[in-house]
Protein backbone atom coordinates (compact mmCIF):
# COMPACT_ATOMS: atom_id res chain seq x y z
CA UNK A 1 0.00 0.00 0.00
CA UNK A 2 1.32 3.38 -1.01
CA UNK A 3 1.21 6.22 1.50
CA UNK A 4 -0.42 9.45 0.23
CA UNK A 5 1.59 12.63 0.59
CA UNK A 6 -0.05 15.97 1.37
CA UNK A 7 -1.88 17.89 4.07
CA UNK A 8 -5.04 16.92 5.84
CA UNK A 9 -8.09 19.16 5.82
CA UNK A 10 -7.58 19.98 9.52
CA UNK A 11 -3.97 21.06 8.92
CA UNK A 12 -5.07 23.34 6.09
CA UNK A 13 -7.88 24.89 8.16
CA UNK A 14 -5.56 25.54 11.12
CA UNK A 15 -2.99 27.16 8.81
CA UNK A 16 -5.63 29.34 7.16
CA UNK A 17 -6.97 30.34 10.60
CA UNK A 18 -3.50 31.39 11.77
CA UNK A 19 -2.94 33.40 8.58
CA UNK A 20 -6.33 35.12 9.01
CA UNK A 21 -5.56 36.11 12.63
CA UNK A 22 -2.11 37.45 11.70
CA UNK A 23 -3.57 39.41 8.78
CA UNK A 24 -6.25 40.92 11.00
CA UNK A 25 -3.65 42.00 13.56
CA UNK A 26 -1.48 43.54 10.84
CA UNK A 27 -4.40 45.52 9.36
CA UNK A 28 -5.42 46.80 12.80
CA UNK A 29 -1.86 47.91 13.62
CA UNK A 30 -1.52 49.55 10.20
CA UNK A 31 -4.74 51.54 10.72
CA UNK A 32 -3.62 52.60 14.20
CA UNK A 33 -0.29 53.77 12.77
CA UNK A 34 -2.02 55.82 10.07
CA UNK A 35 -4.31 57.39 12.68
CA UNK A 36 -1.37 58.36 14.89
CA UNK A 37 0.55 59.72 11.89
CA UNK A 38 -2.39 62.00 11.02
CA UNK A 39 -2.47 63.18 14.66
CA UNK A 40 1.24 64.01 14.48
CA UNK A 41 0.57 65.99 11.29
CA UNK A 42 -2.23 67.91 13.03
CA UNK A 43 0.05 68.83 15.94
CA UNK A 44 2.77 69.89 13.50
CA UNK A 45 0.33 72.06 11.54
CA UNK A 46 -0.80 73.82 14.73
CA UNK A 47 2.83 74.37 15.71
CA UNK A 48 3.47 76.03 12.34
CA UNK A 49 0.35 78.15 12.75
CA UNK A 50 1.60 79.26 16.18
CA UNK A 51 4.86 80.43 14.58
CA UNK A 52 2.96 82.26 11.84
CA UNK A 53 0.73 83.94 14.44
CA UNK A 54 3.76 85.06 16.42
CA UNK A 55 5.31 86.57 13.29
CA UNK A 56 2.00 88.30 12.57
CA UNK A 57 1.94 89.69 16.10
CA UNK A 58 5.52 90.97 15.80
CA UNK A 59 4.54 92.92 12.69
CA UNK A 60 1.08 94.08 13.81
CA UNK A 61 1.37 94.19 17.64
CA UNK A 62 -1.74 92.04 17.94
CA UNK A 63 -3.06 88.66 16.88
CA UNK A 64 -5.63 88.45 14.07
CA UNK A 65 -9.25 89.00 15.05
CA UNK A 66 -11.75 86.21 14.83
CA UNK A 67 -14.73 88.04 13.32
CA UNK A 68 -17.10 85.10 13.67
CA UNK A 69 -16.94 84.84 17.48
CA UNK A 70 -18.25 82.72 19.23
CA UNK A 71 -18.20 80.22 16.34
CA UNK A 72 -14.56 79.94 15.24
CA UNK A 73 -13.76 80.12 11.53
CA UNK A 74 -10.23 79.06 10.67
CA UNK A 75 -10.42 80.22 7.05
CA UNK A 76 -10.62 83.92 7.96
CA UNK A 77 -7.40 83.83 9.96
CA UNK A 78 -5.56 81.55 7.54
CA UNK A 79 -6.52 83.84 4.64
CA UNK A 80 -5.07 86.80 6.56
CA UNK A 81 -1.86 84.86 7.32
CA UNK A 82 -1.63 83.69 3.70
CA UNK A 83 -2.13 87.20 2.32
CA UNK A 84 0.56 88.51 4.67
CA UNK A 85 2.88 85.71 3.50
CA UNK A 86 3.19 84.26 7.00
CA UNK A 87 2.16 80.84 5.64
CA UNK A 88 2.59 79.39 2.15
CA UNK A 89 -0.71 77.50 1.90
CA UNK A 90 -3.87 76.73 3.86
CA UNK A 91 -3.53 74.13 6.57
CA UNK A 92 -6.21 71.49 6.12
CA UNK A 93 -6.82 68.45 8.27
CA UNK A 94 -5.01 65.38 6.83
CA UNK A 95 -8.21 63.32 6.88
CA UNK A 96 -9.87 65.74 4.49
CA UNK A 97 -13.42 67.00 4.18
CA UNK A 98 -14.99 64.27 6.32
CA UNK A 99 -13.15 65.49 9.43
CA UNK A 100 -13.16 68.74 11.38
CA UNK A 101 -10.70 71.40 10.23
CA UNK A 102 -8.45 73.39 12.52
CA UNK A 103 -10.06 76.12 14.59
CA UNK A 104 -8.86 79.52 15.79
CA UNK A 105 -10.52 81.50 18.54
CA UNK A 106 -9.74 84.71 20.38
CA UNK A 107 -10.95 86.01 23.68
CA UNK A 108 -14.08 88.07 23.02
CA UNK A 109 -13.14 91.73 22.64
CA UNK A 110 -9.40 91.01 22.79
CA UNK A 111 -6.74 90.04 20.30
CA UNK A 112 -4.04 89.46 22.93
CA UNK A 113 -4.91 85.80 23.45
CA UNK A 114 -5.79 82.99 21.07
CA UNK A 115 -6.58 79.30 21.05
CA UNK A 116 -5.93 76.86 18.22
CA UNK A 117 -7.70 73.51 18.07
CA UNK A 118 -7.28 70.32 16.10
CA UNK A 119 -9.35 67.21 16.48
CA UNK A 120 -7.26 64.11 17.21
CA UNK A 121 -8.46 60.70 16.09
CA UNK A 122 -6.73 58.97 19.01
CA UNK A 123 -9.11 59.80 21.85
CA UNK A 124 -6.69 58.43 24.44
CA UNK A 125 -3.86 60.77 23.40
CA UNK A 126 -2.10 62.10 26.49
CA UNK A 127 -2.00 65.64 25.05
CA UNK A 128 -5.76 65.95 24.52
CA UNK A 129 -7.46 69.09 25.80
CA UNK A 130 -8.80 69.57 29.28
CA UNK A 131 -12.40 70.65 29.88
CA UNK A 132 -11.18 74.21 30.59
CA UNK A 133 -9.45 74.36 27.21
CA UNK A 134 -12.12 72.78 25.05
CA UNK A 135 -14.88 75.04 26.34
CA UNK A 136 -13.49 77.71 23.95
CA UNK A 137 -14.61 75.55 21.03
CA UNK A 138 -17.79 74.11 22.48
CA UNK A 139 -20.79 75.38 20.56
CA UNK A 140 -23.67 73.62 22.25
CA UNK A 141 -22.92 70.29 20.59
CA UNK A 142 -22.12 67.20 22.62
CA UNK A 143 -20.76 67.21 26.15
CA UNK A 144 -18.12 69.90 26.86
CA UNK A 145 -16.65 67.79 29.66
CA UNK A 146 -15.78 65.11 27.13
CA UNK A 147 -14.00 67.52 24.73
CA UNK A 148 -15.37 65.59 21.79
CA UNK A 149 -14.98 66.73 18.22
CA UNK A 150 -14.59 65.36 14.75
CA UNK A 151 -16.81 64.30 11.96
CA UNK A 152 -18.24 66.56 9.30
CA UNK A 153 -21.14 69.00 9.48
CA UNK A 154 -23.33 66.23 10.88
CA UNK A 155 -21.17 66.44 14.02
CA UNK A 156 -20.26 62.79 14.38
CA UNK A 157 -18.22 62.92 17.57
CA UNK A 158 -15.32 60.55 17.21
CA UNK A 159 -12.20 62.48 18.23
CA UNK A 160 -10.62 64.34 21.12
CA UNK A 161 -9.72 68.05 21.08
CA UNK A 162 -6.10 69.16 21.08
CA UNK A 163 -5.76 72.83 22.04
CA UNK A 164 -2.82 75.23 22.02
CA UNK A 165 -3.29 78.62 23.66
CA UNK A 166 -1.30 81.78 24.04
CA UNK A 167 -0.49 82.86 26.64
Image (tube, rainbow, N blue to C red):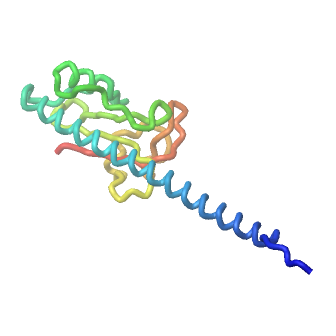
- Residue at 20% x, 18% y is 83
Q: Residue furthest right?
A: 1
Q: Position of residue 56 (x, y in %)?
A: 13, 29
- Residue at 50% x, 51% y is 31
- Residue at 20% x, 39% y is 50
Q: Residue furthest bottom?
A: 1
* Quarter of image, res 54: top left
Q: Position of residue 75 (x, y in %)?
A: 32, 24
Q: Residue furthest top?
A: 83
Q: So how many labels did they put on this image?
A: 0
Above or below, 24 against 34 in this view is below
- Residue at 21% x, 25% y is 81
Q: Is residue 55 left or right of residue 46?
A: left
* 18 and 60: which is toward the camera: 18
* Quarter of image, res 112: top left
User: What quarter of the picture does the C terminus occupy?
Assistant: top left
Amino acid sequence: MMKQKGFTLIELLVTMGIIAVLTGMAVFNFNQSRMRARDVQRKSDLSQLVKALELYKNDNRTFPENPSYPVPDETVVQTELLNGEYIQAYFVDPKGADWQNYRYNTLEGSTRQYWLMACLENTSDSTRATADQCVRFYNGRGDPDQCQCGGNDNFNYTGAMYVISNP
